[in-house]
Amino acid sequence: MPNNLHTYHKTLQQLRQWLPQERITRLRNMALLLLGLQLSGAIHLPLIVRKWPLPGKIPSLTNRLRRFLDNPQVSVRDWYHPLAQQLVQAFAGKEMRLIIDCTKVGFDYRLLTIALAYKKRALPLVWSVHKGKKGM
């Protein structure tokens, strides 16, 4: 747990640099989300919050995370842009492998993603959702 707390504080510090005008409560929740995603290796909210360095019952923490994710004041693109810039800058002058992927999401939508290949992971740089079937 102490390592989780250290990682949380380090992440929060970085977020404050990237988004200095953002409310601290939102930055804290984002830092917790990123920590939970990294440590759990999962996308299911209850599994994410189990890795948080906070006391509380799993359902309560899950509801907290769900409220944060549903907050219309949190713009995914605005929040992600500084991270995507950092990823590209980290590879400046080096060979980068980009992955282009089209994935079906929902009944009649597809997600187009361009990601940076890194250590058997795909780190998204840009994405967009389009109406239509995969391959169209």
Image: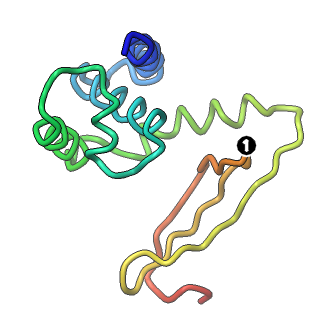
Image quarter where the N terminus lies is top left
Q: Where is residue 34 in the image (x, y as percent from the top left)?
A: 42, 33
Image quarter where the C terminus lies is bottom right
Residue under label 1: 118
Q: Where is residue 109 in the image (x, y as percent from the top left)?
A: 43, 80
Q: Which residue is drawn at 47% across and 87% down?
A: 132
Position of residue 104 in the picture relative to residue 49 (left or right): right
- Helix, strand or loop under label 1: strand
Q: Which residue is drawn at 40% across and 24% down?
A: 19
Q: Which residue is drawn at 59% across and 50% down?
A: 124
- Give the quarter of the image for residue 51: top left
- Give the quarter of the image for residue 22: top left
Position of residue 74 in the picture relative to residue 79 (left or right): left
Above or below, comparing residue 38 to residue 108 in the picture: above
Q: Residue at x 50, y 89 (%)?
A: 133
The colour scheme used here is rainbow
Position of residue 86 in the picture relative to residue 18 (left or right): right
- Give the quarter of the image for residue 11: top left
Kind of residue indicated by mark 1: Tyr
> Around disc 1, counting alpha carbons within 10 Å, would you say few (fewer than 14), some (14 to 19), or many (20 or more)?
few
Position of residue 116 in the picture relative to residue 97 (left or right): left
* Numbered-mark total: 1
Q: Position of residue 81 (x, y in %)?
A: 52, 39
In front of the other: 69 or 77: 69
Q: Position of residue 113 (x, y in %)?
A: 59, 62
